[in-house]
Amino acid sequence: MRKNIILTVLRGFTFGITFVFVLFCACLTHIFYSDIFRLSPNEITRSLSNVLSNVTFHCKKIQDCHLLPGDILVRRYITERTRLFDTMIHPYFTHSAFYLGDDKIAEAVGEEKNPINDIQVATFSKSDWFDEEIESFVVIRPKKYNGKFENVKEDLEKVAEDPDYRFGLPKQGEKITDCADFIVTPLIKEGVLAFLNTPSYINPDYLFALAIKSRSDFEIIGFYVRK
């Protein structure tokens, strides 16, 4: 009798601990996505469905989109470079770049064999943005450059040309940046984007969330989602 009572208590205790642990993990996940990504992968999928139904311009290939200097590109494309990040963090989008015009993009591409190439200005038409395996992409156009595009472009080019800059999680006061932070930093500096409620880690999903939630500041002018 006493043994059965003890077993029942232990089962209840184990269930309680498990429930609290699951609840704790769920809360951490919610906080993580709310702060870092602002939209969960499911929310992004639903938002993309809304985009598909409300935006008329659909370019199946990035080269079919009518890009203008200052456009922001985000994509989902699992490569050897992004596979670990995708497996561990589960974002929707995995990379972003900034269109400079004249077939040039600025992007923080990742850790290269030669670290000088971590952040670079590249020829757009010769980049992997033209790869057939890209699962989805969105072209985001900021509306409030107000003559500041050249300043943003110059800021990006200076970082790309600085041999001391490296790809990685950004650290205050250090020359380290990633693909989305690289883009957002000059936009904030030049006043194109207000420094409001910015997450502790800026990523491509956050760029898409900005476009969805701040329609007065951004518009989506091209997209593709593989069915």
Image: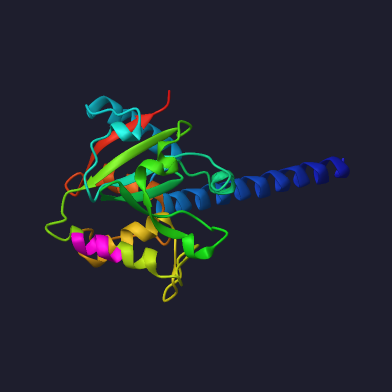
Residue toward you, 88 or 149: 149
> Quadrant of residue 161 in the image?
bottom left
- In percent of width and height, residue 48 lies at 34, 33
In the displayed image of the protein, which residue is found farthest to the bottom? 173
- In percent of width and height, residue 20 lies at 61, 49
- In percent of width and height, residue 131 lies at 45, 35
- In percent of width and height, residue 200 lies at 41, 62
- Image point (86%, 44%), residue name: 2
Which quadrant of the rendered structure holds the C terminus?
top left
Q: Is residue 4 left or right of residue 11?
A: right
Can the viewer see residue 118?
yes
Can the viewer see residue 195?
no
Residue toward you, 64 or 5: 64
> Coloured how?
rainbow
Magenta span of residues? 150-155
In the displayed image of the protein, which residue is found farthest to the left? 146
- How many numbered discs sit on the rendered protein? 0
Instruction: Based on the picture, tell me whether residue 26 belongs to the magenta stretch.
Output: no
Residue toward you, 127 or 217: 127
> Quadrant of residue 124 in the image?
top left
Which quadrant of the rendered structure holds the N terminus?
top right
Q: Is residue 191 left or right of residue 20?
A: left
Residue toward you, 133 or 90: 133
Q: Main secondary structure of the magenta part?
A: helix
